[in-house]
Amino acid sequence: MSETVRELSVQLGDRSYPIMIGEGLLEARDLTPFVTGSQVMVVTNDTVAPLYLDKARGCFPGKQVHSVILPDGEQFKEWQTLNRIFDGLLEQQHTRKTTVVALGGGVVGDMAGFAAACYQRGVPFIQIPTTLLSQVDSSVGGKTGINHPLGKNMIGAFYQPKAVLIDTRTLQTLPPREVSAGLAEIIKYGLIRDTGFLAWLEDNMEALVALQPAELAEAIYRSCACKAEVVALDEREGGIRAILNLGHTFGHAIETYAGYGNWLHGEAVGTGMLMAAELSCLEGMISRADCDRVRRLVARAGLPEKPPVGMTADDFMKLMAVDKKNVDGQLRLVLLKAVGDAFVTSDADPDNLATTFSRFCTPAA
Ligand SMILES: NC(=O)c1ccc[n+]([C@@H]2O[C@H](COP(=O)([O-])OP(=O)(O)OC[C@H]3O[C@@H](n4cnc5c(N)ncnc54)[C@H](O)[C@@H]3O)[C@@H](O)[C@H]2O)c1
Ligand SMILES: O=C(O)C(=O)C[C@@H](O)[C@H](O)[C@H](O)COP(=O)(O)O
Ligand SMILES: [Zn+2]
């Protein structure tokens, strides 16, 4: 294991929890201090299990460790697959004292967390994220849930983990497309709240794409610090937490339109952030140069810059109408007052929104 283990905390009173970040942590950390009972249920998938399940078991010496291995993919973030977690817990006679462990990317994390929130009305859970996206975003903050054919993450619960263990070495097996997807959420933090981080990303993007360990560790730490701060301010998204949704109103529409799994969440968020930046520019808040700056960074991360061919303004409007941020049928969007300063508004000019769609949507041939 590397010498450096960096630790952050999500400050939520008696539900506060640590985020431990380091290379090789899966082989080095005893997580039993975060487990109250004698049983552990590791939830993972059929891609991650052969790579990391044995190592994860090693984090719980002296405990009885079972596992549920789910099929891999965003299309399985739904009821029937969720139910396999409950089947596993009941078949192995897990009790209220059991600890659920999410081992994998955001799909596994969101489902395992939701299962933990529901099983016997709530059992403790631990996040061991293994994708870049899950290490910088989904493992922190307690949003859990599943998709519905009509909308992303429509069924779920706020339910915080007891601890988050980030082993940055797991990223060395991640496919490049998944690395890019994670970079989208990392860029998001710079855009919403941290211009210093954004400038650092501009200096280090190629190192991140190439999975350079020191740069990765720094990006993960700074992203988690930003998310932990926002979540501590507003756990249940009554206000400021919604800025973490930059690019997601457009992005979730893209994911639903494309069919879950065809566009990665991070890819859709990358394009969604470009659309949000364009609209912010048309609204007179950021300059055209700022917009180009965002576009260049998203492109360097290897992310798509346009929605799927054939997706129309109408498609967007229908799908965005079910966004969770909407109030009384009014669309609410996260825009940029300035680079590094996001806010939520229901006042975007419909003409500017229409112009944004006309600049981004490509008609089917
Ligand atoms: N709860 C939140 O706050 C939050 C935040 C952001 C995203 N999300 C959700 O997270 C999901 C996306 O997460 P994701 O990007 O991690 O996708 P994912 O969970 O689908 O993982 C991506 C792929 O990488 C594989 N994988 C995981 N770890 C690996 C490793 N170390 N080596 C090789 N392959 C590995 C997975 O099996 C999968 O095929 C979406 O459902 C999104 O809605 C939730
Ligand atoms: O933690 C949050 O809050 C976020 O919005 C983080 C997002 O990156 C994430 O994709 C989240 O799942 C979106 O939440 P939703 O409430 O829009 O479904
Ligand atoms: Zn997201």
Image (cartoon, rainbow, N blue to C red):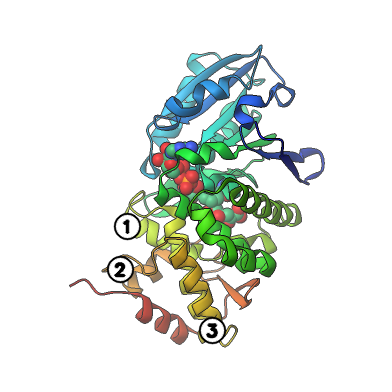
Q: Give 140 or 249, whichever is nearer the viewer.
A: 140
Q: Position of residue 229 (x, y in %)?
A: 74, 55
Number of numbered labels in the structure image: 3
Establish if 79 lies above or below 62. below
The residue to which callout 1 is attached is 258
Establish if 88 lies above or below 202. above
Q: Are marks 3 and 1 in contact (CB under 8 Å)?
A: no
Question: From the viewer's perspective, is 144 left or right of 358?
Answer: right
Q: Position of residue 94 (x, y in %)?
A: 57, 17
Q: Mark 3: give few (<14), some (14-19) or many (20+) Cα within 10 Å.
A: few
Disc 3 marks a residue whose amino acid type is Ala
Disc 2 marks a residue whose amino acid type is Met
Report, in whole angstroms, how far the alpha carbon at label 3 lies from the one at label 2: 27 Å
The residue to which callout 2 is attached is 311
Question: From the viewer's perspective, is 13 left or right of 201?
Answer: right
| Mark 1, secondary structure of its residue | helix
Disc 1 marks a residue whose amino acid type is Ala
Q: Give 166 or 105, whichever is nearer the viewer.
A: 166
Question: From the viewer's perspective, is 228 left or right of 147?
Answer: right
Report, in whole angstroms, how far the alpha carbon at label 2 lies from the one at label 1: 9 Å
Of labels 3 and 1, earlier in sequence is 1
